[in-house]
């Protein structure tokens, strides 16, 4: 069945000719017509005060303003909204518009904002293991690439999952000997899917100068075997030891352009991108090159990293980044801090010990006072602190540090954030609102993931695994709630998947796991803490108005109101009225940034073809 079309008149468009493989698109046919001659309107109708380059009508337009108004028409002048209201009230703008776009009943939302995504492109890696479901498939894919490219001096991949490997490898990650068998003579390094682990062969360890005697960085681990030899993996902050490993830097700008086009195809017009775990910085030079070429199809807000072992040096670098990248399209606004690790290797910092290892509470590389001073220092520069915290004790440390900064930095109005939030103490939830801390959630993870929840999270956390990832609690407490994918940890950052996860807290797509889709949102098999469901309006706000506020963009974007930038998307169904299990099926028909069409489904290429 064809998706609704759009009749468009006289436009200048940037067509996303390619999109990332994660963008699953529905393609409708748009008809175009020439505009009527409105010259008489300027002279004869006395409406010279009304000016519009574009007029969009016959749609259901969700403004996401404070009243959640739904309107019928938008008028745009010089890339900004000059009218949002009824068709009758908009007639004066239509009469003088240079082009009129018939939305043919489609649904319109503000341009979506990604609250935490790592800048990535397949061009940065030789191969990817994302989507493979067994250790045997991963090893076969690595071998296939290495065997096919004997001319390369080093090999670099992404996406292994420690949970696919047996025994002690489940905790420490796969052994180096597995890679030694594939590449005995050349360095081979593979980063984990969650960005918190690195798997190396013996030659890669030698290339980087890492030996059994190399000290780990605070909050990290260089795993050893029973004899004290290198196991094969680095965890968390120890991944910074791989920073000198060769990464493909050719055509970074072009790779980023394709990455952004994929996000435009999913409805994104703005994003926040922090660095990875100290090993893979944001490719700001590539973004700047796109901005200089007027090809940056996204508002980009970014961060630099601040570590516990070189805090002063990192803060100096952060200020340099802030000065260098301070434009409207590209701006560094934050310092990212890792308080703990992840649940996969049980380095997330907990207030109570791990169920499967009562001697362990997880890890942090920070003392509380040092963390307090780091957050305060970031805020003094006029930037916000963006804090990674998975475990509940890490969340408490982050909140305590932000509270210290609030009390000790004069005129501090920075919108600090804590992200991931897998476990949160009940008493800490209201502190987010009290301290104006943004809760950056990852709703893509808010269900009992097949082959992972039962094998990893439930054994590690026991009863706590039934009450992970609060969301409604934050909303009820009055906190600013923002959604994010943490791509490439989430391989498909489709925001409508996230909206469905937030509304249902249940399985969205069974195909990647080889399980049937659910037909009832209350199906208990994968349902996680249903009391934390939020409604679709709140999910939309978490990608629009609230996300804009969190990034200091509320005066520019996030809602469809006069004076704001004309950042909006046209989709094929009214998600406000959609069946909760059908929200994921929403298709983006067109994406506009500053009034310019940057994605058109009718003219895009299906990435699967």
Image: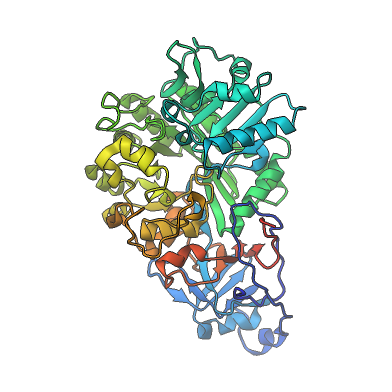
Place of residue 100 in the rendered image (x, y in percent of width and height, measured from the top left)? 65, 78
Q: Quarter of the image for the C terminus: give it.
A: bottom right
Taking the image as shown, residue 409 lies to the left or right of residue 595, namely: left
Taking the image as shown, residue 150 lies to the left or right of residue 184, namely: right
**Residue 39 in sight from this viewpoint:** yes
Place of residue 117 in the rendered image (x, y in percent of width and height, measured from the top left)? 52, 45
- Residue 200 appears in which quarter of the rendering? top right
Q: Residue at x 67, y 56 (%)?
A: 607
Q: Residue at x 32, y 61 (%)?
A: 522
Total labels drawn: 0
Q: Quarter of the image for the N terminus: give it.
A: bottom right
In the displayed structure, would residue 550 be above or below residue 338? Answer: below
- Residue 53 appears in which quarter of the rendering? bottom right
Foreground of the two, 217 or 359: 359
Q: Residue at x 44, y 51 (%)?
A: 444
Place of residue 119 in the rendered image (x, y in percent of width and height, measured from the top left)? 58, 42
Foreground of the two, 596 or 180: 180
In the displayed structure, would residue 477 be above or below residue 314? Answer: below
In the current view of this chain or complex, which residue is farthest to the bottom?
44
Place of residue 443 in the rendered image (x, y in percent of width and height, measured from the top left)? 41, 51
- Residue 369 appears in which quarter of the rendering? top left
**Residue 52 in sight from this viewpoint:** no
């Amino acid at each position: 069945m064809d998706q609704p079309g759009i009749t468009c008149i006289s436009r200048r468009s940037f067509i996303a000719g390619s999109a990332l493989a994660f963008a699953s698109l529905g393609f409708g046919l748009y008809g175009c017509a020439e505009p009527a001659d409105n010259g008489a309107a300027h002279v004869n109708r006395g409406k010279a005060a009304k000016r519009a380059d574009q007029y969009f009508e016959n749609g259901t337009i969700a403004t996401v303003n404070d009243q959640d108004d739904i309107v019928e028409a938008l008028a745009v002048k010089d890339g900004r909204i000059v009218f949002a209201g009824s068709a009758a009230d908009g007639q004066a703008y239509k009469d003088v518009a240079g082009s009129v776009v018939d939305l043919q009943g489609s649904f319109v939302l503000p341009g979506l904002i990604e609250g935490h995504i790592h800048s990535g492109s397949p061009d940065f890696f030789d191969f990817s293991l994302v989507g493979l479901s067994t250790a045997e498939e991963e090893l076969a894919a690595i071998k296939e690439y290495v065997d096919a490219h004997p001319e390369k001096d080093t090999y670099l991949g992404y996406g292994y999952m420690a949970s696919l490997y047996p025994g002690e490898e489940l905790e420490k990650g796969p052994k180096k000997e597995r890679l030694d068998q594939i590449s005995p003579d050349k360095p081979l390094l593979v980063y984990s899917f969650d960005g918190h682990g690195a798997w190396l062969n013996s030659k890669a360890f030698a290339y980087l100068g890492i030996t059994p005697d190399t000290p780990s960085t605070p909050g990290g681990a260089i795993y050893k075997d029973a004899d004290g030899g290198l196991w094969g993996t680095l965890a968390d902050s120890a991944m910074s030891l791989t920073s000198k490993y060769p990464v493909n830097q050719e055509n970074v700008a072009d790779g980023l352009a394709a990455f952004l086009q994929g996000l435009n195809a999913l409805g994104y017009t703005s994003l926040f991108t922090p660095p990875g775990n100290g090993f893979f910085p944001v490719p700001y030079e590539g973004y700047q090159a796109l901005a200089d070429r007027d090809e940056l199809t996204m508002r980009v807000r970014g961060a630099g990293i601040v570590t516990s072992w070189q805090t002063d040096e990192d803060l100096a670098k952060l200020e340099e980044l802030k000065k260098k990248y301070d434009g409207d399209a590209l701006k560094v606004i934050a310092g990212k801090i890792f308080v703990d690790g992840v649940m996969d290797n049980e380095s997330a910092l907990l207030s109570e010990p791990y169920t499967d290892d009562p001697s362990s509470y997880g890890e942090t590389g920070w003392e509380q006072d040092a963390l307090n001073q780091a957050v305060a220092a970031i805020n003094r520069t006029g930037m916000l602190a963006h804090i990674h915290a998975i475990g509940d004790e890490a969340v408490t440390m982050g909140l305590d540090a932000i509270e210290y900064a609030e009390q000790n930095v004069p005129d501090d109005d920075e919108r600090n954030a804590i992200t991931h939030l897998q476990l949160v103490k009940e008493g800490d939830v209201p502190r987010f609102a009290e301290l104006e801390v943004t809760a950056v959630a990852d709703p893509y993870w808010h269900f009992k993931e097949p082959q992972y929840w039962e094998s990893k999270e439930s054994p590690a956390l026991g009863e706590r695994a039934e009450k992970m990832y609060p969301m409604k609690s934050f909303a009820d407490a009055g906190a600013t709630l923002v959604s994010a994918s943490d791509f490439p940890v989430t391989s498909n950052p489709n925001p409508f998947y996230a909206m469905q996860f937030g509304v249902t807290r249940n399985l969205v797509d069974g195909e990647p796991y080889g399980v049937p889709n659910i037909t009832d949102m209350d199906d208990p098999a994968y349902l996680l803490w249903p009391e934390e469901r939020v409604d679709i309006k709140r999910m939309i706000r978490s990608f629009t108005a609230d996300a804009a506020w969190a990034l200091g963009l509320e005066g520019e974007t996030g809602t469809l109101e006069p004076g704001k930038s004309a950042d909006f998307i046209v989709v094929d169904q009214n998600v406000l009225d959609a069946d909760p299990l059908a929200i994921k099926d929403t298709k983006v028909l067109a994406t506009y940034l500053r009034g310019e069409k940057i994605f058109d489904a009718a003219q895009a290429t299906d990435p699967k073809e």
